[in-house]
Amino acid sequence: MTRFLPGLLAVAALLGARPAAAQDSVFGIRGLGFLGEPISAHSAALGGGESMFDGSSAVSPASLASWRTLAGWAVGAQSERTFNPGTGAVSLSSMRFPMFGFAAPVGNRLVIGVNVSDYLNRNWDVQRTDTVMPRDSALPVTDRTRSLGGVTDIRFAAAYRVSSRIALGVGLHVLTGSVQTAVERDFPTDSTYHTFGQVTETDYHGLGASLGLFVSPIPRVVVGASARINGRLSEINPGGNASVRLPTELAGGLYVTPWDGVMVATTVIHDNWSVAAPTLVADSQPPSRDVWSVGAGAEVTLLKLFGEVTPLRAGYRWRQLPFPVGTAALSERAVSGGLSFALAGGRANVDLTVEGGSRTAGALTESFTTILVGLSIFP
Amino acid sequence: MARTSVWRNTLLAGLVAAGGCTEKLTTPASCPEVCPNSSVQLADTLLTGADVADTSVRGYVLTSEATYVAASSLDSLKSMILLRFAPVPTQWVQTATDTVQAVFPPDSVFAELQLVFQDTAVHPKIVFYRLPAQFDTTMSYAQAQAYFVDSAVLDTVAVPDSGNMEARLPISVVPAPGDSGVVSIGARVIADSPTVVAFSSGHSLTTAPALSYFVHGQPPQDSLSRNLPDTATFTTFVQSPAVVQPPPGVLAIGGLPAAHSLVHLSLPSVAVDSIGVVRATLLLHLVRPAVGFPGDSFFVNAFPILRDYGPKSVLFPDTLITGVAVIHAGQTGTVEIDIAPILRIWGTTSGDSMPRAIMLGVFAEGYALGEVDIQGRLAGGGGPQLEVTYVKKYEVGVP
């Protein structure tokens, strides 16, 4: 299995180095893009409720303290979506690898790790038809605008188990990435016009820091809190440089195991995305807003398959998205469920999650079903 | 452990399958809610003063180098064909008996010409004339009239609908031994209405006009016979009106001798862009109807120039960035040529050093009757104009 780990990480790194050419939501066109969720497949099955405490998620750096051995993980997500712009439903699909990482204990109390995940996803592809009047003649045109890329959050973090009841974590977030925006105009009915195409690449850079704390005030209960402070996100493209303020994220969570084999957890996150509003307004876009994200889920580990414990999970999540569509606020809700398989005598784990939900902004609705596959290995 | 391998293989197969999914990417826009912030905007501009220098030069293909010879009675073009053949052989050898036989006098002489163009509705005839063997190859249409007289008529033949035309010439057309042995003949067209007939000239692998001498042996081999061919070595036609350098303010394109027009352009930056120019139309204003075979068409090309050496400029060797317009004989008004590929290549890094000049010529030069005369820069209405449709600079918004 140790031979398997480098290969897996290499594949994951390769895939993560270049975002898959697909859009995660048409609403990613607005603002800075579609917000990524740095959570693992098994946290997704719990509606993100356990993301605060999940070592392979990147909500709180303190969660790394949960690892007792070397671990590596990666997530793949296949999403099927239906968007109705008001003129009929359109089916879309995408395949992504939104997160991978690894963690390694250093001594008995310290764990260090790296997590690479989507922060802002700007993959979208839109086509529209129009009629223009060059040379005083009506001319049908087809415009296609594509955006490929986004901003990746590379978190270098360390967690320290102060005692059996307290864990601390700190993280350094490096935001990096690029977006290729391609604009194409075609003149399908008149060959005397030549197709126009232009590709512009924009690079993004930014930094952030996070701090997390877990406390277990009483047995079977863990309370978590984290804060993440971001600097400005710099944009560089041939048109010039710009920067935008990024939000401060505050999160809290509760992890309870009321009975053996049963766990419930919830995580609440607040981001003050309104700090980005002045820059967006200056670019003639609707202002961004502060957003909440709430997730809750439960896990039961009473089932055994092939002699291995097979956790069953279910969850629900709701979140607001910071970039409105016109004057309408955008929100997302989803129910999820999933299970895990332990492999290789517990040295590997596969999480399967199915999530279904919708995004709504005024009269516009996008429904989605996502299948997430998470692979974790513990060589 | 065996079970682990099965799981692992299944997992890997699943990952591979997932990675190979077909993705549907494109969403119809729901504007303005779910639309990109920026959109493509077109703009038009008519550059009336783009032509800052122009000139016409004749002689790229001479009349005697064309692939055809034309006899015309059109109002716009009157022409007569002049043909000179190689010297008539004086002897021939009967190979079976290895006997040398004299050609003169032959039994009969036929002229054979391959038809290139005619108007079958007119049913024209070709009248053949005897010409001096060493006629002046530079004579004009008016000068040639002196030879096209009734006393010099050799034969009059109806033009067939297609294929070869054959005329039986009198034996007297063959010079007696001791002379140069050169036969020269002329041809003109007659018909109930103005028309034009063209024959291949022999240039550029076309079939040359030919004479055939039918001869027989002398006694006692007088039953032997032979057909001796004799192809034309010089072919041309004289025209009226005479082809001359166009007056100031007029640019000539095509014709014979073939003319090129060189036009230097001064363009704003929006018109020289490797991606932003979506349409660029060069507008050529004809000063007279296009000349060509009736009912036929030809091409006027606009070539970008790689190195500007005036009439001997080096053209850019890429047909994909050559502007082309189809011209119909008799066409009037304005000719439009798409030269967007030229402006786009001028906007590239490699094309930036190319002179902003184009060469206008007829395609394929010397292969068909075709000429247009256009307004030049010095004409009252101005020279060639350029209408450019371009995309305004597409701005990528800041975050």
Image: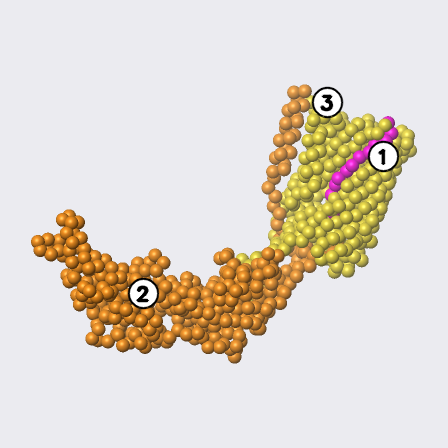
Chain colours: A yellow, B orange
Q: Looking at this rendering, what residue extends furthest in the bottom direction?
A: B380
Q: Residues within 10 Å of mark 3 (few under 14, many from 20)?
A: few
Task: Give left or right: position of B376 versus A41.
Answer: left
**Host chain of mark 2:** B
Q: CA distance from mark 1 to mark 3?
A: 27 Å
Q: Nearer the viewer, residue A261 or B181?
A: B181
Task: Give left or right: position of B201 versus B46.
Answer: left
List x then y, in percent, for residue A227. 86, 43
Task: Give left or right: position of A259 versus B99.
Answer: right
Q: Quadrant of residue A226?
A: top right
Instruction: Specify start and end residues of the magenta stretch as a single range.
Output: A108-120
Please give the residue where the numbered disc 3 appears in the rendered image.
A345
User: Taking the image as drawn, is residue B301 in sight?
Assistant: yes
Please give the residue where the numbered disc 2 appears in the rendered image.
B235
User: Taking the image as drawn, is residue A367 in sight?
Assistant: no
The residue under the point 64% across, 63% down is B392
List x then y, in percent, for residue B363. 43, 62
Q: CA distance from mark 1 to mark 2?
A: 97 Å
